[in-house]
């Protein structure tokens, strides 16, 4: 018989967080696959492309060249140089090598940034819907999440006016993820500049999650890093995972003022030390090499987005905003909640997984109760089959 450990054995802070919802869905899907189920997987938040050849070759060359030892904690100078030069070239930012740190994925950069900035009781403004880990990382640090509701009718748009109305004397930081996961919402260049100015004038840190910044379909990608006069209060959180199809490589970074980077490096020195040495060499190849792969990925994502929206429109009662970036759709399935004994989006997603063998992430994980997130970097055949199964399952509930 297994005896569970008393709850008081564990630190209080671990009780403030939950297992990542996307990881939980992936684990449940893996169990069904092991039992022989043929799943259509719209759950995974990653591109379907292989990592480009020149990036893989750089890692192989690093291994063959025995570049396999410790490096300095924030990353070798060459990888930090590649980060700041890529960002400056694309967005007009002005960071030095000492204002960059290379991390074990973008989530690592985010987690550590929250840890060094947010104290117990500090408020962090978080627009809804939000990426699953934001809430838990803030709460783990002892911070208080201030949820900023957005309107589905306005494509989940985030405005400077809404941000300003949510600020209190306890506000320490604002998190913006643009384009966003899960809804693909984009903060306009005008709103972004106003939010940057507002945060800077109030002495509030603006954490800009740029994981999908190159997958902006609403126009030219924009970054808060271009507003160099506000560098003191801006932290750019970047990732190579989605841009270069490098999710498993765990390659991320942060760009910020020297004091912020120095403290990120201090924390990382007691945590992971340097990110993997060969991944740093691969990152240099990605950032400093040809960017043609990025343009090609982006073009295919737009095509798949439009195809997915077309298929979802064929399901009665399902509505969906048009994502302006990233590679997810966030359909509203509220018409089916309350039918077939289903009370929540989580229950709907669970039954759809087990009965229709379609993998989706329920909206509760992102702060809303009438949606599911579908990741569309799959083949068109899989989109056809997955949406067919969804339609069959949902209409059977009516």
Image (cartoon, grey):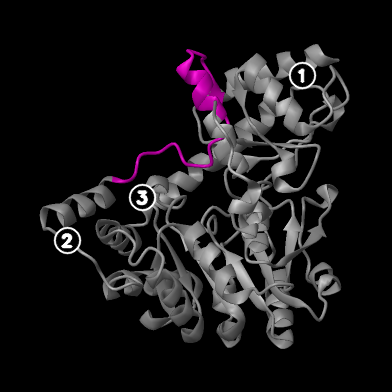
Lower position in the chain sequence, tag 3 or tag 2: 2
Badge number at residue 134 = none
For mark 3, give the secondary structure: helix
**Depicted 131 relative to depicted 191: above or below:** above
Mark 1 vs mark 2, foreground winner is: 2
For mark 2, give the secondary structure: loop
What x and y, as percent, mark residue 79? 31, 69
Q: Which residue is mark 3?
A: 249
Distance of mark 3 from mark 2, alpha carbons?
A: 16 Å
Badge number at residue 67 = 2
Mark 3 vs mark 1, foreground winner is: 3
For mark 1, give the secondary structure: helix
The answer to whether residue 42 is magenta is: yes
Residue that lies at the very extreme toward the right in this rendered image: 338
Q: Is residue 291 visible in this depiction of the protein?
A: yes
Lower position in the chain sequence, tag 1 or tag 2: 2
- Label 3 Cα neighbours within 10 Å, binned few <14 / some 14-19 / many ≥20: some
Lower position in the chain sequence, tag 3 or tag 1: 3
Distance of mark 3 from mark 1, alpha carbons?
A: 37 Å
Q: Which residue is mark 1?
A: 394
What x and y, as percent, mark residue 296? 42, 46
What x and y, as percent, mark residue 183? 69, 47
């Amino acid at each position: 018989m297994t005896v569970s450990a008393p709850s008081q054995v564990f630190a209080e802070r671990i009780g403030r967080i939950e297992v990542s919802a996307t990881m939980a869905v992936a684990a449940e899907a893996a169990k069904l696959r092991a039992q022989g189920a043929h799943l259509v997987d719209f759950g995974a938040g990653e591109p379907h492309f292989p990592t480009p050849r020149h990036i893989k070759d750089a890692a192989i060359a690093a291994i063959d060249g025995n570049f396999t030892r410790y490096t300095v904690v924030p990353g070798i100078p060459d990888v930090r140089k590649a980060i700041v030069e890529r960002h400056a070239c694309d967005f007009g930012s002005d960071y030095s090598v000492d204002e960059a740190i290379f991390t074990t994925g973008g989530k690592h950069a985010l987690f550590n940034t929250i840890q060094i900035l947010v104290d117990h009781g500090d408020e962090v403004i978080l627009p809804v819907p939000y990426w699953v880990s934001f809430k838990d990382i803030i709460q783990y640090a002892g911070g208080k999440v201030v949820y900023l509701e957005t309107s589905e009718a306005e494509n989940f748009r985030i405005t400077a006016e809404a941000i300003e109305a949510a600020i209190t004397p306890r506000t320490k930081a604002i998190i913006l993820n643009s384009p966003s996961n899960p809804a693909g919402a984009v903060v306009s260049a005008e709103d972004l500049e106003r939010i940057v100015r507002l945060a800077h004038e109030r002495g509030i840190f603006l954490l800009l999650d740029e994981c999908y910044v190159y997958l902006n379909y609403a126009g030219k990608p924009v970054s808060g890093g271009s507003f160099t006069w506000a560098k003191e209060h801006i932290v750019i959180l970047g990732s190579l995972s989605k841009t270069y199809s490098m999710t498993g490589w765990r390659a991320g970074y942060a760009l910020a003022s020297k004091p912020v980077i120095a403290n990120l490096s201090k924390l990382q020195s007691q945590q992971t030390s340097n990110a993997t040495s060969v991944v740093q060499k691969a990152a240099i190849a990605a950032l400093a090499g040809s960017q043609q792969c990025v343009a090609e990925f982006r073009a295919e994502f737009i095509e798949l987005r439009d195809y997915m929206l077309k298929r979802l429109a064929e399901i009665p009662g399902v509505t969906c905003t048009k994502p302006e970036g990233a590679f997810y759709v966030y359909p509203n399935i509220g018409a089916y909640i309350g039918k077939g004994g289903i009370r929540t989006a989580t229950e709907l997603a669970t039954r759809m997984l087990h009965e229709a063998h379609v993998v989706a992430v329920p909206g509760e994980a992102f702060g809303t109760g009438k949606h599911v997130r579908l990741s569309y970097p799959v083949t068109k055949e899989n989109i056809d089959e997955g949406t067919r199964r969804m339609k069959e399952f949902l209409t059977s509930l009516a």
